[in-house]
Image (cartoon, grey):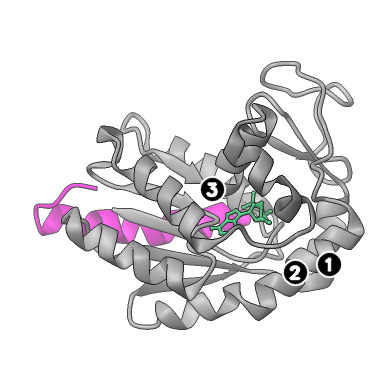
Amino acid sequence: MVILLFGPPGCGKGTQARLILDWFKPRIIPSISTGEMLRAEMAAKTPLGLKTQAIITAGGLVSDDIINEILCARISQPDCAEGFLLDGYPRTVEQAEYLDKLLAARGLPPPVVIHLDVPSHVLIGRMISRRQCPKCGRMFNILTDRPKVPGRCDDDDTPLIVRKDDREDVITERLKTYKEVTRAVLSHYESAQHFQISGDRSAAYIFEEITKILEGIVEGERYQGGGI
Ligand code: ADP
């Protein structure tokens, strides 16, 4: 199964991705976040990280060529042979078309699209108050999902940081990019398995909705004799 978590920045894709991976255990599903991959490149100051840094911190989109190349390299790894979860890709119609070709070439089915829909004013508030663990990537929110020890990650005690692109001016730009470019990806998936969930709820509520969807799909595949 290929799961595609889709929605505006700050809609909770990363949080739900973690919960979904846990739900599938003991089966291990690779979770691929192009944003996390790019942040790792920036932190390591690789040529790719240095090249993309200015675009990311300004709230724009990295070019399709670059992103498609890193995605192709990642899903060519053996752990992706049976499927994976995508968070933050595809973000343009060109990327969606490229993904179609990659999946077909690997004999994988079209993705199950889970769209988390959240109004812009909620997103801005959420992103301004979120904090991330630079080591494990876990997100917290100083208003709604506080770490047990203020300023430190619950999982590995690393000091939490504010992402460079979580400043209000950059957030506004990211939301604009989403509306003008990324939202159009949804129409590409009109005929695919496509589920819309109102993301303006608690993470636990949203996850319950997602598990209902996934249970239905996993049951269906079991019935047809397929795996995830
Ligand atoms: P969010 O979903 O919160 O905006 P991400 O971590 O998914 O954050 O992405 C951070 C940034 O990385 C994006 O604003 C963009 O600049 C870049 N990026 C991530 N994925 C893609 C993609 N598929 N295509 C182009 N740029 C991307």
For residue 20, say whether it is visible.
no
Please report the residue visible at 73 percent of the width from the left and 22 percent of the height from the top: 154
SS for tag 3?
Answer: helix
Q: Is mark 1 within 8 Å of ligand 1?
A: no
Q: Amino acid at mark 1?
A: Thr
The residue wearing badge 1 is 172
Give the spatial CA distance, label 3 vs label 1: 20 Å
Say if mark 2 contacts mark 1, CB within 8 Å.
yes
**Numbered circle sitting on residue 175:** 2
Residue 34 marker: 3
**Residue 39, quarter of picture:** top right
Q: Is residue 178 left or right of residue 173?
A: left
Q: Earlier in the sequence, mark 3 or mark 1?
A: 3
Pinpoint residue 151: horizontal percent, then vertical percent. 87, 26
- Is 122 displayed left or right of 136 in the figure? right
Disc 2 residue type? Leu
Distance from disc 2 to disc 3, alpha carbons, whole Å, reads 17 Å
Secondary structure under tag 1 reads helix
